[in-house]
Every structure is written in C-alpha cells, then in structure tokens.
Image (cartoon, rainbow, N blue to C red):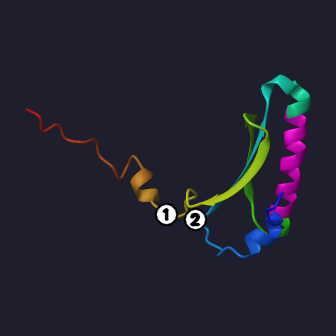
Amino acid sequence: ADAPRLAAWLAGQPGDPRQQLSIVAHYQTESGSAGQQAALAEASVLLADAGAAGRLARLVVEPGADGVVASLAYDHSAPSMARGLQSSESNPPAKDTSR
C-alpha cells in the first residue's frame, strides 16, 4: 500500500537490456478460479504501468499468499550475449580424463 506506482518506480531505475521485469501475482487456492482471476486483474494493472514506462514484463500468476510483487533482476540476457557458449557446435563434448 505504501509502495510507489510501478511506472514511477521504474522511471527511477537505470535502463539495462539485461534486466528482466517480473510481475508475480499470488492467489490462495481455496479461492479457486475467482481468486486466480482477481490476481490476474491486479497484475494487469501493474503490467499496464510497466508498458506506460516502456518496459516489457514477465507475468506469473501462481498459488501462494495473496499479493502482487514486481521485481527487476539481471536474469535476462541481451540478444547476443553468451550465444557462443550455448551453441553445441562451438562446444565439443568434454574429454574423459579419469582413466
């Protein structure tokens, strides 16, 4: 309740293509589909705020304690980052040196 609007918070954060904005909405399983829909609606407000700030976001809706959280983390790789390490062609199989 005391948190700033997401768009205002994001405006104060440095822009870095490695950052991933995640919005995670939780709902109690006892509330069933209605709880899930309510969590999604609440998360959609934050998603719109993120869009207004020019940010794309990952959206997760899952069972848990009620509430919605937004976080920025360095867990999104830039398009050209570490691609050579992920390619099977550039990484031959490890040599067995145990013998």
The residue at 78%/48% (across/down) is 68
Residue 18 drawn at (x, y percent): 58, 65
Splitting the image into 4 quarters, where does residue 21 fall? bottom right
Q: How many marks?
A: 2
- Magenta residues span 36-50
The residue tagged with tag 1: helix, strand or loop? loop
Residue 41 drawn above or below residue 96:
below
Label 1: few (<14), some (14–19) or many (≥20) C-alpha neighbours in 10 Å: few
The residue at 57%/62% (across/down) is 79
Camera-side mark, 2 or 1: 2
The residue tagged with tag 2: helix, strand or loop? loop
Q: Are marks 2 and 1 in contact (CB under 8 Å)?
A: yes
Residue under label 1: 81
Task: Give the mark nearest the N terminus, 2 or 1.
Answer: 2
Residue under label 2: 18
Query: Mark 2: which amino acid?
Result: Arg
Looking at the magenta stretch, what is its main secondary structure? helix
Residue 63 drawn at (x, y percent): 74, 32
